[in-house]
Amino acid sequence: MDDLFSANLSDDLNAKALIDALTAELVEANKAYHELDNPIIPDDEFDRKLAQLRRLEVLYPQFKKVISPTDTVGGQPSKGFQKVKHAEAMLSLDNAFESEDILDFEERIRRVLNLNKSVQLKYVAEPKIDGLAISLTYKKGILVQAATRGGGVEGEDVTENVYKIDSIPKNLVDFPIDFIEVRGEVFMNRNDFDELNYELQKLIDFAIKKEINPIKLYINPRNAAAGTLRQKTVETEKKTKARKKKNEKTKASYWVKKQWANKQLETLKGRLSFFCHGWGAVSNPFAESQWVALNLLNKFGIPVVKERQLCQSVDDIFDYYEKIIKQRPYFSYEIDGIAVKLDDLNLHSRLGSSSTSPRWAIAYKLPPEKVWTVLKDIDIQVGRTGTLSPVGKLKPVYVGGVYVSNVTLHNEDYITGISSDSQSIRKGKDIRVGDTVEIYRSGDVIPKVSDVDLSKRPEDSVPFKFPSTCPVCGNKAIRLEGDSVTRCVGEFDCRAQVLGRIQYFVSSEGLNFDGLGANLIEQFYDRRFPTSNRRWIENPGDIFKLKSELEKAGIDLIQEKGWEEKSVQGLFAEIEKKREVQLDRLLTALGIRYLGVQTAQRLAQHFQSWNNFANTFLSDTQEETTIVNDLCSIDGFGEVMVTSIIQTFNNPTFKKWLDNLIPELLVQDVEGVQKTDSVLSGLGIVFSGKLEQMTRSEAKIKAEALGARIYNSVSKNVDLVVAGPGSRKKTKDAEALKIKIISEDIWLKMIS
């Protein structure tokens, strides 16, 4: 990207000459590739030159040709999207469904920041557009990269496709910020969606008439926007060998593909829109409030939703919410709620974020659409931790913008009409196979049951009997006292749990393998080597041995159905990339019950390296009581979680998994990823007593943001105790261990 700014373009003549030369070369290459079926330059060279031409055309639009390779259908097809890491993580918003949730949101803010009711909190509220989250990186005002949200840390590089969207500015004139990640939504207006599907229906009708595989209509505007933007090939495909046979069916199929490619390109250029709702990393602060910042971005040409409002109080939020509900049918675009953000950017930095969501913002979801349909069956699925989860099979129904055929039924109590806090739900009505049920999508995402029409219940219906054995492995399924779910006791003897663990290991929550998803893991798990009868993949370590084991068995994956040379090379290249892993990511990927992303980060910070971790859990030198006390001292760790961690690492089969996995990996020590410019980096800290200038919650947030490890109790892991009034026991413990004790005033000077 940076070569653009270092290029020798000292005068306009040089720029014009370079644009002319690149245009001529790429036009000739396009013709050779698409019309003559005889490529004259390598694909990667074509991609590089096309990207260079596009950026030159942004800088010098006066020299762009009327017909340019950057706008022409038939340009080099995309080879798929590269992963790109966001400079600052793209987090999602927590959801609020009731007014009480918004009141709780403000109460949490006041509690963390120690603000009383007299302090006015302002908010920016805006319609939450139902689109595809996107991050646009601008350097010196030039759009240099566009990426989807992905897993939050890294997304897909969709720069080439985004450059075709007319509504996204490519060059911000006199933009005062050197570097910024502009965050927002790519979406499609309702009318454009209807027109697109009308045109696609014509292609579908033609395809059916010619007895060729038809394309599909898009389900809703969000689906259309996301599908078009993330198309790996938005250009016309080159001639295939089959087409040379000149049969009518092949020519018809090629024509449909060509027309579909044209529709995709037209959609990118004219039917997709963009609104900015915030930003990620930025080279320099440019405003003190959310409201002023959005207005400034809009001033320099970045589209911002017009219907936003500055709210002076929570009551203003409620009024705005009701107004948006009434206006929703008249919007040209789809929304699924309103986004509410604190206006004061200084408070943003003080509140910080959890591992998934900012603490200064929330999504207030609109009331869900509800429809009635028939529950045809109840299926029991088994998860990676052995949980038996009932799933309702529905007569398909359209609700909340999609067709729904499955609905979550949570657990045994939910089916019988009892909530998690032992209260009656649905007026105590149980759910039975054959019932007519009312369905809604919670937050327009997860389908749930809100009611049962008893007047339509079949006469021969019977209450659903929850199984006492695992439907997958046949082992006992038990429900422990105080637990809300029933679990299979089979663990590593249960196919569903073993598969679930391996699938979680490769998922976006785990090591985030690209091209190695749940379906492929299941296929490899079910395949066996002919001589040893061993499964291709029996545990996570087998993933990294797959290539050598296949070669040893004389199996060429390229010869297998559905595989090509490029896909095989891509799979093994991705596996090699994942050998180097951060400790916290590895601990998350192991799928230990109750250990989430944030707690895995704290566990990794506590032990610093895999060797330290293994010396505690995988050796006989540590007493279990010592381990329990040690882990319970970590902030956020309780006995239930600690017991789960210890039991998992005591399991003989799990130990064998680790013996097979760890030698294949290069596990990074935590020191390699911590901040090194902070005086708190790597320090273990305990807050004791009452802090007077900030709450403990805010102090912990600040300390963790600066690379510190937070503990609940004083131990040898602690380097510093911040003591306020009322600190007694922890102060004495610190004195006994000769741990440094400081006041809140000194603490504030340290972090300033």
Image: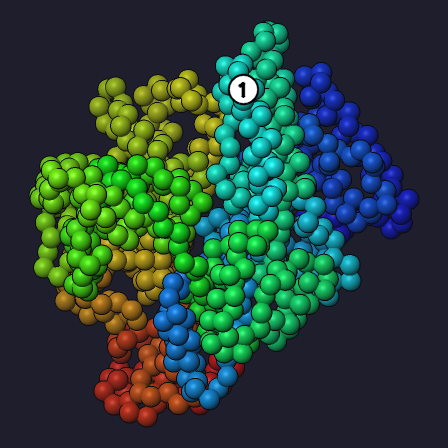
Name the residue that disc number 1 marks.
207
Near-viewer residue (533 or 234): 234
Counting from the top left corner in percent of width and height, residue 672 is at 45, 59
Left or right of residue 394, residue 186 in this image: right
Q: Is residue 451 above or below residue 353?
A: above
For mark 1, give the secondary structure.
helix
Q: Position of residue 587 (x, y in %)?
A: 32, 54
Which quadrant of the view contains residue 276? Answer: bottom right
Q: In the rendered view, would you say 586 is above or below 499?
A: below
Is residue 322 in sight in this rendering?
yes
Residue at the spot x=42%, y=22% of the render? Answer: 562
Between 217 and 61, which is closer to the camera in this rendering? 217
Q: Residue furthest bottom?
A: 725
Which residue does the image show at 49% across and 71% down from the upper left? 319
- Residue beneath the point at 10% across and 49% down: 478
**Vertical comparison of 685 with 656: above or below:** below
Residue drawn at x 47%, y 55% as measured from the top left: 336
Please tell me in which quadrant of the rendered image residue 484 appears. Answer: bottom left
Q: How many marks?
A: 1
